[in-house]
Image (spheres, grey):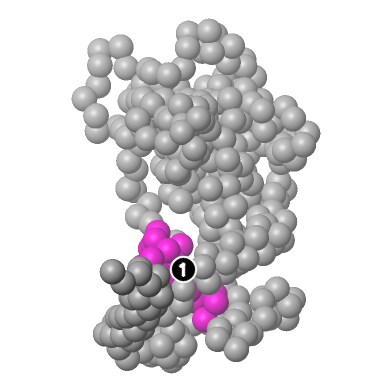
Amino acid sequence: MSGYDSSDDDDDDDDVVLLVCVMDSVIGKIRRQSRVPKHVSSFSGHEKMCELTTGHEGLLLEHIRMNRDCFHRLVTLFTVQNRLQETHTLTVQEQLMMFLTMVAHVDINRRTSYEWKHSGETVSRYIDTISSHLVQLASRFIVPPDFNDVSTVIAKNQRFFPYFQGCVGAIDGTHIPCVVDSDVAAAYRNRKGFTSQNVMAVVDFEMKFTYLVAGWEGSCHDARVLNVATSNPAFMFPHAPEGKYYLVDAGYKNKPGFLAPFRGQNYHLHDRRREDSDRRKEMFNFRHASLRKSSSEHLEYIVIACAVLHNFIKLFSSEDAAFNPEDDAVDDGNAEDDVGEASTQQQREESNDMGHIRDHIANAMWNDRLD
């Protein structure tokens, strides 16, 4: 009877290990040979950028909402101030073009990565970097209005002058959709059911931002954002001097420095009038809404960054058609909702001083119409 030889099992184990290694190597080689490249476009990101900057002006405007001259000025600004540096894979022009394309079209990272042939990590890094630099430029491009000046939009329009010659801008709030952690989602969920941040903007009548507060929870009412911004010195709100004021909608209180419309009155002269309607107040509300509309049709860093870009484009590309809205196109569809939100107490608290100013303007406009 022969004895048991353990060396035979060891040889078998070695053969199995060798076979597994060979198979793994062969499968890996097959996978590498059959791997499909992710970025297969004939255009590299740099070639795409060159095509846009040297091609038809309209194509560039569609992609980045900025004309060629304005784009080159932005590149110069970032280059001269050494805010961006060229790398072996990305020029400063391409870095900015990638950012502008993404914010102009509210694009997602994956699509931007595919379009510009760079990794998602690279896209995210430059989005963060450029946003940060634009926020640092906010103090240069988002500046308070000249309180001694009367806007030409008012001065050259007989519907607004001389009635609103004390007006220095308009204030409104808007909700920017955002994604937040589940533990704070309730605070950011607004009355329309989606999570957002409440952004309050002050805009002049040349359609430039003069002040901006971003980052408030979507559940926060517009009036509270304004109250905190105007009462807390840390927010550096540009208070209008005596005799000057901002236009606000019916969601805000009529108080010194802030002129709201009459409550309970139509915003459109052509609306069906109620028996108790006041034609003077209707006319005031209509022109108030028209003037406010002409200035307010426009996550915290990206909002401020976009506001800086808006003002930069307005400064160097004022002929842009987007800055020439129809003067008579007044759509104040949210006004009735704002009126409904205002409490009876808030209506009682409205300042008599601004109430007298509002009555004076309404009477003057109505009397001039009858003359």
Please provide percent x and percent y for residue 365.
Answer: 46, 33
Q: Residue at x 69, y 49 (%)?
A: 144
Residue at the extreme left: 272
Residue 199 can be seen in this image: yes
Look at the image and give the residue range highlighted in magenta.
94-114
Relative horizontal placement of residue 178, taking residue 38 as reference (left or right) = right
The verdict on residue 105 being magenta is yes
Is residue 330 depicted above or below 13 in this figure? above
Q: Amino acid at mark 1?
A: Gly
- Residue in front for this viewpoint, 333 or 244: 333
Residue under label 1, please give it. Answer: 120
Is residue 172 depicted above or below 58 in this figure? above
- Residue in front for this viewpoint, 202 or 193: 193
> Looking at the figure, which quarter contains the C terminus?
top left
Relative horizontal placement of residue 244, taking residue 268 as reference (left or right) = right
Q: Residue at x 56, y 84 (%)?
A: 90
Is residue 354 depicted above or below 185 in this figure? above
